[in-house]
Image (spheres, rainbow, N blue to C red):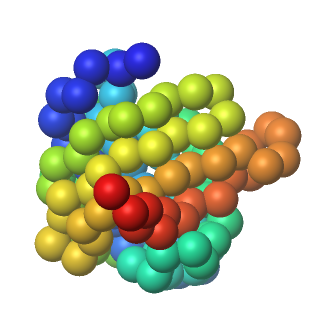
Amino acid sequence: MEPPVSRNFVIHRHQAKRLHYDLRLEYRGVLKSWALPKEPLNTPGIKRLAVAVEDHPLEYIDFEGTIPEGNYGAGEVAIWDQGAYVLEEARPEKWVFFLKGRRFRGRFTLIKFQEPRNWFFMKMRETGA
Ligand SMILES: [Mn+2]
């Protein structure tokens, strides 16, 4: 069980060959990263595909700008949401965390459903109590 420390996250809107969104969570000295082919949703219970991609360096959390032609991911990167998050669960196949962003606020989960790198990203429904 991870201690309830506050870490940072970012969601990049990345207009590469295909528009997608990159969810990046600061964790153990890197940015754990997932690429979402569709715009992430703030609606509880609606799953979005999130493909695990390579870790990024922490400094990338503030990156905005143009990745030049000829480079991997060439295109425009903009910060779509950012803020702090509290990790509540980090297992190999399930993460639960509370996002405190400008757009997204609430409890979200990432659930691995298919090897090697396909996950669902979803806002969780509020439970009573
Ligand atoms: Mn990307």
Front residue of this view, candidates 79 and 64: 79
Question: Horizontal placement of 14 versus 63: left or right?
Answer: right
Q: Nearer the viewer, residue 77 or 123?
A: 123
| Residue sitting at x 43%, y 62% | 127
| Residue 110 shows in the view | yes
In percent of width and height, residue 81 lies at: 24, 68
At 23% from the left and 28% from the top, the residue drawn is: 4
The quadrant of the picture occupied by the N terminus is top left
The image shows residue 61 at horizontal and vertical percentages of 23, 47
How far across and down, in percent of the image, does residue 79 sit? 24, 68
Q: How many labels does the image show?
A: 0
List x then y, in percent, for residue 47. Answer: 63, 71
Residue 72, compared with residue 57, is above or below; it is below
Asked which quadrant contains residue 107, the reply is bottom left
Q: In which quarter of the image is residue 14?
A: bottom left
- Considering only vertical position in the picture, is 40 above or below 113? below
Q: Confirm whether residue 16 shows in the render.
A: no
Residue 9 or 6: which is nearer the viewer? 6
Does residue 44 sit above or below 24 in this rendering?
below
Furthest residue to the right? 115
- Specify the quadrant that holds the C terminus: bottom left
- Residue pictured at 23% horizontal, 76% vertical: 103
Q: Is residue 21 above or below residue 129?
A: below
